[in-house]
Image: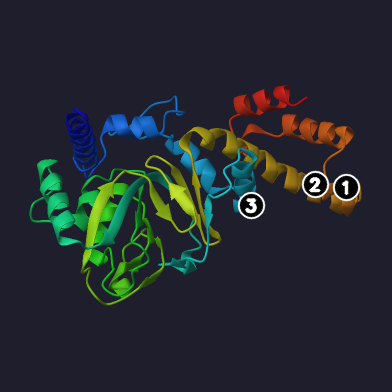
Amino acid sequence: MRRIIFNLLVFAGFACTTITAQAQFDRVAMDREYIISLTSQWKGERLSDGRPFVSDNLLERLKKIVLTHAWGGLRKHKFNNQYQGNWMMINPDKNTVMTGRVVTAQYMPLRPDFGDLIRKVGLAEGHGEKAQSNVWPIEMLRDGDVYVADGFAKVEEGTLIGDRLANSIYSKSKRGVVFWGTVRNIQEIKKVEGFNGWILGDHPSSLTEVMLTSINAPIRVGDVTVLPGDVVFASPYGTLFFPAYLVGSIVLEAEIGNLRHAYGIMRNRAGDWTTGQIDSNYTPQMTKEFHDHLRKMPDAELPMPRKELNEYLDANK
């Protein structure tokens, strides 16, 4: 009897393991329900694949934010691991800031049995049979997307794109890439008008012994965990990755921070406030004067809509 019970338990455990394994490997590109579950704190509009739709207007406002202010906003919400620096920019001379909605991709060293399974599942999902798997994420891009990939920092034979794929990426997304990995033929990639990338380097070799393992699943980019639908801020000073549901509040707080910084310098140069005063927490009187200044600013000089500013001021009297 004990033997029968033991065998039943073993069989049940094996069945659970088998079901779990099938669940893990039944998709390369994650489905809408999975992405919604990852980003459940977002309450607004979503794209057809389930990623949060952060508005184009908000993405444009984010471009004008000082990185330090935005980083501080993330830390205020206890997101302490959202910054990654030490990038090589493909076009550093353009002093570009790129923002967009993240599409993630994970790459790993090739393992033939797993690689065969990935290709079988990917083809069943409708990805191009003739295309290499590194093309599959690019096929899914749309305007406003940024292709973010973990290439496990492989340099030689780890090049995720060349100039032809760079052209395709830009034509679909009007954005560039952030790769924890490398590219090839950077001399020609630099010629792709409007395209930029934050990468670890370049190498003339082709992609070899590397397999795509997931699209729109969580990935690691250096020190950051990145989710599909995050918003990326990529600048010459580093990259930040924002949970979509926090972008609006952090952008507004950073815009207020920018205005506060400029106002403090103006009052210091006029001799009204000392350096010590503007480099520390404002007193209630200083805050009142700053808020009065904001209320009088012309709408055309405000980085945010007047309605958002008034709501902020009313909440911080």
Tell whether label 1 touches label 2 (CB within 8 Å): yes
Residue on which the image places disc 1: 277
Which amino acid does the dot numbered 2 rest on? Gly
Residue 282, horizontal then vertical, whole percent: 84, 40
Residue on which the image places disc 3: 68
Determine which quarter of the picture holds residue 298. Answer: top right
Give the secondary structure at mark 2: helix
Q: Residues within 10 Å of mark 1 (few under 14, many from 20)?
A: some
Mark found first going from the N terminus, 1 or 3: 3
Residue 181 seen: yes
Judge left or right: residue 260 versus residue 219.
right
Does 219 sit above or below residue 23?
A: below
In the image shown, does 159 or 236 lie closer to the viewer? Answer: 159
The span from disc 1 to disc 3 (Cα, nearest Å) is 20 Å
Report the number of numbered marks: 3
Tell whether label 3 touches label 1 (CB within 8 Å): no
Which amino acid does the dot numbered 3 rest on? Thr
The span from disc 2 to disc 3 (Cα, nearest Å) is 17 Å
Give the secondary structure at mark 1: helix
Residue 48 seen: no
Query: Quick one: which residue is furthest to the bottom in this view?
Result: 204
Which amino acid does the dot numbered 1 rest on? Gln
The numbered disc on residue 264 is: 2
